[in-house]
C-alpha cells in the first residue's frame, strides 16, 4: 500500500478489514488471484478447487491472496448466434481484469484460466497491466475410449456430419454426445484453448506441463501450491509480466505453436497480445516467423494423438527441446531459470512418433499458411497442417452464402457438390458481428467425407479443432466492402497453399461493376455487439476493440 496516501489507505484498510483481512495481512504482498471458475464450462469447473491450493501457497510464502472471478464462456456451448459473443468476450475479460487490478492495488497476479478466449484475454491483461504475473491452467479432459478407439471433442463435431450422411446411426450418435466430452478439464485436443495454454508455457509465464497433465492429477494440486509460492517471490524481486513477454519470447511462442500444429485462431490472439504488450507485429511478420520452423508434431484433430499423449511424450518442454536451435534461449521464465537452462536439463521427447526430431519433421515448414491475392489483399489464414496435401491446390466454382446458417442448411440437405468452394461471408468481426467460429460446418465437411474435394473460405474463423481446406480471417471483410462481398455463384476461385494465394478469377472491370451495386445484408448487432461493430479492428490486426 505504499502507493496510497494516508487518506486513501484508511479507506482501503477499513473496507478490506470488512472482508476479513487483518491489518497485518495488508502489510504483506497482496496477490490478486484471477479466477475464471464457473459451473457451466468444463474447462473452468476445476479452477474453484485449484484456487484454494494457489491461495495456500501464497499464504505459506508470506503473501495475502485476494481472489476475484471473471466471465469464461465456452466456445463449444456458444454455437450459432451464441458464438457472436465469444470473440468480443476476449477483450471484455481482459478489460475487466485491468479494471479490477487498477482499482484494488494488487502487487501481483495469478491467472487461473482455460479455454479459447480466456487464456488470450488473460495474457492481454497481463501484458497491459504489467505486474508480476504467473499463469496456471487446469489440465486436460480425459478422452473417451470405445472399441479400441480414442475420442475427444472434435470427434463429436465430426460425428454430426457422419450422422447426417448416414455413416453412423442415431444410437451411436447419441452415445457419442453423452460420452465423448468425458470429464472436466480443457478439451483433449490441440485446439485454441491448448494452443494458448502451451503458448503461455513456451513464453515462460506458466509452469511447464500445466496444459498436458490430466485435470485430476495430484501433480496439478502441487503445481498450484508452487504457483502460489512463486508469485510472492516474483513480487519481491520486482519481476513484472513484460519481462517474460519480450519480442524474443513472443517469437519463441509463435515458432513453437507453428511447429506443433496449433490453432488458426492463434493468428488473431498473438496480434492482440502483442498490441497489449506494445510490441509491433504484422501478419506478414507472423507468417515469416512461423514458416522458419518445421512441423514436428500434430495432435487431434489432425492426428490420432491427444493432449495426454503429448504429455506422456514430454509436453511443451520436449517440443521446445526439439526446435531449440531456432529459439531465443536466453529469455527468462517464471521458474527463475532461462529457457536455455531449462532445456539443458531436459533430455527431450520420449516418443519420436509423437514429437519428431527437427531433422525428420512431418513437413519442412510450420503449420500455417497466410494467403494473399485479390480475394484477401490484407491476408487470410489456413491451418495447412490440417489439410490433406491433395487439397493444397484447389480450383473450383464458388457457392456463396451470406451466413453460417445458410451453409449449414445446404449441408444438412446434402446439397454440396464435390469440387466446389463454399464462400461464407459477412461473418467477419463487424459483419457477424463477432467473427463467428464456423466449427460445425467445417466438422460436417469432414464427417460427410467432403474435405478432400470441397474447400470453405470465410471472413469468419474456424475452430482450433477444425481440419480440412478451411480458409478463414479473410481481410478486408465483406461487411467493409472487401472483395469477398463481390463473389457470385459460379465464379472460379483458386486456392494455392504452396504459393500463399487466394484468387478470384474475375476481371477487375467486372469486380468494379459489382462493387457499385454492393449492399450489406441485415445482420443485427444487439447490445454490446453494436459497440463492438463500431470499434473492432480487422482480423489482420487481431480483431481488437478495447486495447
Image (tube, grey):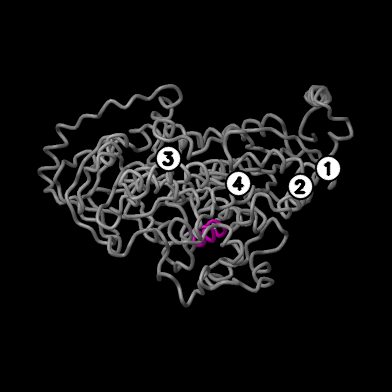
Q: Earlier in the sequence, mark 2 or mark 1?
A: 1
In the picture, residue 21 is in which quadrant? top right
The label number, if any, that marks residue 213 in the structure image: none
Does residue 330 appear in the picture of this structure?
Answer: yes
Q: Position of residue 541 (x, y in %)?
A: 41, 44
Magenta: main secondary structure equals helix
Q: Residue beneath label 4, please?
A: 185
Q: Earlier in the sequence, mark 2 or mark 3?
A: 2
**Of helix, strand and loop, which one carries label 3?**
loop
Q: Nearer the viewer, residue 458 or 241?
A: 458
The label number, if any, that marks residue 59 in the structure image: 1
Q: Circles 4 and 2: CB distance less than 8 Å? A: no
Q: Nearer the viewer, residue 423 or 231?
A: 423
Q: Residue beneath label 2, please?
A: 228
Q: Nearer the viewer, residue 274 or 433?
A: 433
* Gap in angstroms between the C-alphas marked 2 and 3: 33 Å
**Of helix, strand and loop, which one carries label 2?**
helix
Q: Circles 1 and 3: CB distance less than 8 Å? A: no
Q: Residue beneath label 3, please?
A: 543
Q: Which residue is depicted at the point 81% across and 43% down?
A: 56
Q: Earlier in the sequence, mark 4 or mark 1?
A: 1
Q: Which circle, 4 or 2, is nearer the viewer?
A: 4
Mark 3, residues whose alpha carbon is within 10 Å: few (<14), some, or many (≥20)? many
Q: Circles 2 and 1: CB distance less than 8 Å? A: yes
Q: Which residue is depicted at the point 45% across and 47% down?
A: 156
Asked whether, in this view, residue 198 is left or right of residue 262, the answer is: right
Which region shows up in magenta?
248-257
Q: Earlier in the sequence, mark 4 or mark 2?
A: 4
Asked whether, in this view, residue 375 is left or right of residue 92, the answer is: left
Amino acid at each position: 500500500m505504499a502507493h496510497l496516501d494516508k487518506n486513501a489507505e484508511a479507506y482501503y484498510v477499513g473496507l478490506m478489514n470488512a472482508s476479513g483481512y487483518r491489518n497485518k495481512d495488508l502489510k504483506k504482498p497482496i496477490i490478486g488471484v484471477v479466477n475464471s471458475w464457473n459451473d457451466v464450462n468444463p474447462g473452468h469447473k476445476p479452477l474453484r478447487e485449484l484456487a484454494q491450493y494457489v491461495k495456500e501457497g501464497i499464504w505459506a510464502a508470506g503473501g495475502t491472496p485476494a481472489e476475484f472471478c471473471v466471465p469464461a464462456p465456452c466456445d463449444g456451448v456458444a454455437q450459432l448466434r451464441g458464438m457472436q459473443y465469444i470473440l468480443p468476450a476476449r477483450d471484455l475479460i481482459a478489460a475487466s481484469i485491468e479494471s479490477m487490478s487498477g482499482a484494488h492495488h494488487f502487487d501481483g497476479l495469478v491467472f487461473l484460466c482455460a479455454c479459447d478466449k480466456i487464456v488470450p484475454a488473460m495474457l492481454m491483461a497481463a501484458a497491459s497491466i504489467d505486474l508480476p504475473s504467473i499463469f496456471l491452467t487446469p489440465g486436460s479432459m480425459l478422452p473417451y475410449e470405445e472399441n479400441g478407439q480414442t475420442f475427444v471433442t472434435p470427434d463429436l463435431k465430426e460425428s454430426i456430419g457422419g450422422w447426417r450422411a448416414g455413416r453412423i446411426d442415431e444410437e451411436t450418435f447419441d452415445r457419442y454426445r453423452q460420452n465423448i466430452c468425458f470429464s472436466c478439464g480443457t478439451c483433449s485436443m490441440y485446439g485454441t484453448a491448448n494452443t494458448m495454454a502451451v503458448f503461455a508455457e513456451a513464453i515462460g509465464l506458466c509452469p511447464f506441463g500445466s496444459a498436458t497433465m490430466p485435470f485430476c492429477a495430484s501433480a496439478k494440486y502441487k503445481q498450484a501450491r508452487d504457483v502460489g509460492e512463486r508469485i510472492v517471490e516474483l513480487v519481491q524481486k520486482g519481476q513484472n509480466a513484460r519481462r517474460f513477454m519480450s519480442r524474443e519470447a513472443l517469437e519463441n511462442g509463435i515458432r513453437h505453436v507453428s511447429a506443433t500444429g496449433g490453432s488458426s485462431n492463434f493468428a488473431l490472439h498473438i496480434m492482440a497480445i502483442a498490441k497489449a504488450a506494445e510490441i509491433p507485429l504484422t501478419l506478414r511478420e507472423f507468417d515469416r516467423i512461423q514458416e522458419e520452423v518445421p512441423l514436428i508434431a500434430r495432435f487431434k484433430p489432425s492426428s490420432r494423438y491427444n493432449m495426454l499423449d503429448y504429455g506422456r511424450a514430454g509436453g511443451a518442454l520436449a517440443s521446445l527441446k526439439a526446435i531449440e536451435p531456432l529459439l531465443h534461449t536466453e529469455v527468462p521464465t517464471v521458474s527463475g531459470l532461462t529457457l536455455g537452462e531449462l532445456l539443458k536439463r531436459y533430455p527431450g521427447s520420449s516418443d519420436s512418433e509423437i514429437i519428431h526430431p527437427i531433422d525428420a519433421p512431418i513437413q519442412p515448414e510450420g503449420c500455417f499458411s497466410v494467403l494473399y491475392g485479390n480475394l484477401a489483399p490484407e491476408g487470410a489464414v489456413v491451418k495447412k497442417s490440417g489439410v490433406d496435401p491433395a487439397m493444397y491446390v484447389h480450383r473450383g466454382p464458388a457457392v456463396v452464402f451470406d451466413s453460417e446458417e445458410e451453409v449449414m442448411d445446404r449441408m444438412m440437405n446434402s446439397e454440396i457438390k464435390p469440387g466446389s468452394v463454399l464462400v461464407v461471408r459477412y461473418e467477419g468481426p463487424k459483419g457477424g458481428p463477432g467473427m463467428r467460429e464456423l466449427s460445425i460446418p467445417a466438422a460436417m465437411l469432414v464427417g460427410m467425407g467432403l474435405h478432400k474435394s470441397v474447400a470453405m473460405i470465410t471472413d469468419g474463423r474456424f475452430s482450433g479443432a477444425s481440419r480440412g481446406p478451411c480458409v478463414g480471417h479473410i481481410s478486408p471483410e465483406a461487411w467493409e466492402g472487401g472483395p469477398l462481398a463481390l463473389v457470385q455463384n459460379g465464379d472460379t476461385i483458386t486456392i494455392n497453399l504452396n504459393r500463399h494465394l487466394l484468387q478470384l478469377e474475375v476481371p477487375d472491370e467486372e469486380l468494379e461493376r459489382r462493387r457499385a451495386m454492393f449492399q450489406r445484408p441485415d445482420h443485427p448487432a444487439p447490445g454490446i455487439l453494436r459497440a463492438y461493430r463500431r470499434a473492432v479492428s480487422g482480423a489482420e490486426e487481431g480483431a481488437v476493440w478495447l486495447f
